[in-house]
Amino acid sequence: MNFETIIVFITAPSSEVADEIAEVLLEGKLAACVNVIPGVRSIYTWKGKREVDQEVLMVVKSRAVLFEDKLVPAVQKAHPYDVPEIIALPVVLGSQSYLEWVQSETSHD
């Protein structure tokens, strides 16, 4: 099993914002790949009020060691939301060549 590689979900208000965040993550070598999926309908409670918004979902391939100290602060700085969704799941299984590629394309500081 490989828990070093993670998948991070981030929602954004538009493809343009998602592209900007993706660029920050890729330039900083905090992600190997970012998929931007349009057409997400989000229903949630914010400050006691039910909200319904159209968003895009970012699916980010990264490494667990980068998440807390580097990836999260970079997203928070670039994101327009007060409390952006930034959640990570471990990759339990994956093709060895893909997992090695994710490792090679992300920061090793």
Image: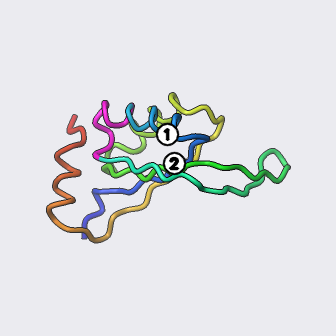
Residue drawn at x 82%, y 53% as measured from the top left: 50
Q: Position of residue 72 (x, y in %)?
A: 46, 39
Badge 2: how crowded within 10 Å, few (<14), some, or many (20+)?
Answer: many
Taking the image as shown, residue 47 lies to the left or right of residue 43, namely right
29 magenta-colored: yes
Give the CA separation, mark 1 to mark 2.
9 Å
- What residue would you read off at disc 1? 18
Residue drawn at x 32%, y 43% as measured from the top left: 31
Q: Do the residues labelled 1 and 2 touch (CB within 8 Å)?
A: yes
- Residue type at the position of mark 2: Ile
Q: Which mark is residue 68?
A: none
Q: Where is residue 21 in the image (x, y as percent from the top left)?
A: 45, 35
5 magenta-colored: no
Element under disc 2:
strand
Q: Which segment did they paint magenta?
A: 24-32
- Residue type at the position of mark 1: Ala
Q: Nearer the viewer, mark 1 or mark 2?
A: 1
Check the image and name the residue furthest to the right.
49
Q: Where is residue 70 in the image (x, y as percent from the top left)?
A: 38, 36
Q: Where is residue 101 in the image (x, y as percent from the top left)?
A: 18, 52
Residue drawn at x 23%, y 51% as measured from the top left: 102
- What residue would you read off at disc 2? 10
Examine the rendered structure and indicate whether residue 89 appears above or below residue 57: below
Quadrant of the image containing the C terminus: top left
Element under disc 1:
helix
Res. 80 image quadrant = top right
Quadrant of the image containing the N terminus: bottom left
